[in-house]
Structures are given as structure tokens and as C-alpha cells.
Image (cartoon, rainbow, N blue to C red):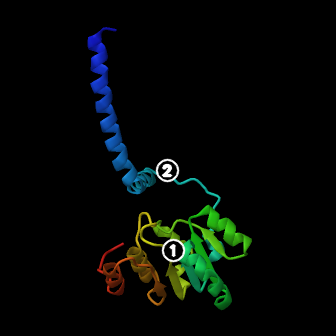
Amino acid sequence: MDIYQKTLYIPLTAIVLVITSTISTYLTLNNHKICGFLLDVMRKMGIKESESSETPASDHKGKSLILLGCHRTGSSLIESLRDRYENFLVVDFSPEVEVRLKAQNIPFLYADISHPDTLEEIDIHHAKVVVSSISDDFLRGTSNIKLLKHVKSLNPEARVIVSAETIKNVLRCIKPEPTMF
């Protein structure tokens, strides 16, 4: 290999490095949107999601209070809920939360609330109170405002409590902008 060929590899390697690091940054930032898009394409092609080890949602129907998320705020509500409600359910997407709550015999469903069908599967139509304790920073593929609208579309009579980090989001929750799901 002569000196000309060696000097050609250095700029080529630098160009490949810049291109791949730029592309990977955008792919990482948008991985939930990309995954959702690919799942929709696969669904349209007739490819179904594989069966998971999740607890069937049908085992948790008819709860009067549903707590969506059990991290900081949600975990601090558990004792109050246990004292005041016999008929409540915690829905979260964390295996650690699942282990902790099942050890305490707290009704738990391991599910992704950003998936539109999850709220319907847990029979949110009959819940009297729905609490989303998850910050928008942790929600992927949805937001508390979208959850509020979706819950209200499924159960207009339910009392819905959601988290909001900004005054703008609080105002949106009080008077949501009309959108279709």
C-alpha cells in the first residue's frame, strides 16, 4: 500500500464517522416514533405482536381507581390508596415496580400506557378516578394532555388527574384543544 492509498483512508474514515454519528443521534432522539411507525407498518402487513408475559388486562377490569405510573409521585400515593380504596389498580411499564408492588399484594398491571389500546383493555370506562402520576419527561409516544383527552373520550364521567410541569400545560389540561384520536 503506497502513501497515496493511506492518505485516502484517513479522510474517508472521518467522513464515515461524521455521517454515522449524525444519523445515530437523530435515530436515538426519534426511536419511539420510528418504532411506532414500524409497528404500524408491520400491523398493516398482517404481522402480529408476539405474546408477552404480561398479565392479561382482563384480570383487572372494573377498578374504581386507576393509577397510571408508580415512580416518585405514584409510589407516594400507594399507602393512601390502600387505606381509602379497596378496588384500585396500578399500571406501570417498569419491571422493578412490578416486583415491588406484587410483593406488597397491590393490584398491578404491567402495560405501556402510550399504546392506545391499553386504556381500553383495562376497562377504564368504569373507573371513577384516573390518576396519571407520570411526568411528560418520562412519557414516550404520548403526553398527559393526550392521556387526559383519551380517558375523557372513553369515560366522560371519570375524574382525571394528570401531571403538568408548566403553566402552559396546566392551562391546556383545564381547557384542552380539540383534537381527534
Label 2 neighbour load within 10 Å: few <14, some 14-19, many 20+: few
Residue 12 drawn at (x, y percent): 29, 26
Looking at the image, residue 3 sits to the left or right of residue 113; the answer is: left
Residue 69 visible to an observer of this rendering: no
For marks 2 and 1 on the same chain, the one whose residue lies earlier in the sequence: 2
Q: Residue furthest top?
A: 2
Say left or right for 33 vs 114: left
Identify which residue, 151 or 5, lies in the foreground. Answer: 5
The quarter of the image holding the C terminus is: bottom left
Occupied quadrant, residue 107: bottom right
Q: Is residue 157 above or below residue 74?
A: below
The percent coordinates of residue 116 (x first, y second) are 46, 68
Q: Residue at x 32, y 86 (%)?
A: 175
Residue 55's place in the image compared with 77, above or below, is above
The reply to whether residue 70 is visible in this rendering is yes
Distance in Å between CA atoms under marks 2 and 1: 22 Å
Question: Element at badge 2?
Answer: loop
Residue at 52%, 69% (x, y): give it: 118
In the picture provided, is 115 more to the left or to the right than 104? Answer: left
Name which residue lies at 67% across and 89% down. Answer: 83
Q: Is residue 138 above or below residue 104?
A: above
> Is mark 2 in CB contact (under 8 Å) with mark 1?
no
Q: Which residue is mark 1?
A: 120
Q: Closest to the observer: 80 or 132?
A: 80
Disc 1 element = helix
Q: Amino acid at mark 1?
A: Glu
Quadrant of the rendering where the N terminus is positioned: top left
Residue 80's image quarter?
bottom right
Q: Which residue is mark 2?
A: 47
